[in-house]
Image: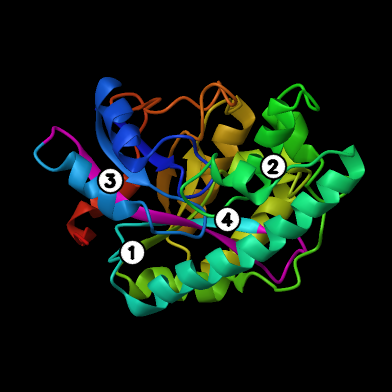
Amino acid sequence: MIVDLHAHTYYSDGSLSPSELVALAIQRCASILAVTDHDSIAGVSEALTAANGRDIKVIPGIEISCDVKCSSDTIHLVGLYLNTDYAPLKELSRHKSEIREIQTRKMMGLANKYFKTNITWEDLKTKTRGVPSRPHIAMALLDKGIVKNIEKGIRFFLKGGSCYIESEEKNVSAEEAIKIIHGAGGIAILAHLAAYKNENKFVSYKEQEILINELVHSGLDGIEIYIPGLSKEDKEFGESIVKKHRLLTSGGSDFHDEKFLPENKLGFIDTTKTTLTVLHREAAFRSC
């Protein structure tokens, strides 16, 4: 069975509509797809409608940016099997959209000054149905021939980059995010554990273990171990840490756009080869 438990639509920083994402998942013969936009549940309803009567199950999800006590770095928690009518979840999604717009407008202004260009908010809105963010500014820079690819463009807006702006508002704490996910009837999963080192975060297994210990204390349910480009060492560490803490295993492509991120191909997990124990919690699923 082909599944993907981490995918984005154009309601955050993906390129496809929820309906198009479902259609691509069906084309890839996927049986289960989780829609997990950044800090937003806006695309879930459309995805569920698109999947109605088709040979695919859509899991309502979200990917929440969180702060932790053990580090100044941001982490991401994926919530799966969510009741998107849960009021605190809806409020989180609404509030984060407002903050994202303020932040993106500031980064856009700084990018225009740094690159001596004239990107407008309207330019960014052509890239997404949601609230524009760093990838959409990078797309606009690519359109103008200022950067060679999206990945290099985004680096200008990450910590240490020439166009980075510190957020005026802290992210929700991981503890609070887990409470909201659980309140919505969902499962809280630490996203793409092995990928944080690509952003110079939690680069050692010791740092990762400290992070996981904190999250387990806050009620973490599982870890997204299986991701594109996973090394043998990272796979072994991930599997050992979930066994140690009796956590669920999850996996997904973190799909955004295969043109710009070709390694993140939708539907790359085959459950005949990779066991995702989070799927054993199917009984916890609640339709929106």
Residue 186 tag number: 1
The quadrant in which residue 196 appears is top right
**Residue drawn 22% across the image and 58% down it:** 285
Q: For the residues marked 4 and 1, what is the alpha-carbon distance in whole angstroms? A: 15 Å
Q: Viewer-proximal residue, 257 or 131?
A: 131
How far across and down, in percent of the image, does residue 233 sit?
63, 30
**Residue drawn 66% across the image and 34% down it:** 139
Q: Is residue 271 visible?
A: no
SS class, disc 1: loop
**Mark 3 sits on what residue?**
47
Q: Is residue 151 visible?
A: yes
Q: Viewer-proximal residue, 168 or 82?
A: 168
**Mark 2 sits on what residue?**
137
Q: For the residues marked 1 and 2, what is the alpha-carbon distance in whole angstroms? A: 32 Å
Q: For the residues marked 1 and 3, what is the alpha-carbon distance in whole angstroms? A: 18 Å
Q: Earlier in the sequence, mark 1 or mark 3?
A: 3
**Residue drawn 76% across the image and 21% down it:** 148
Magenta residues, start to end: 54-74
For the N terminus, the image quarter is top left
Q: Earlier in the sequence, mark 4 or mark 1?
A: 4
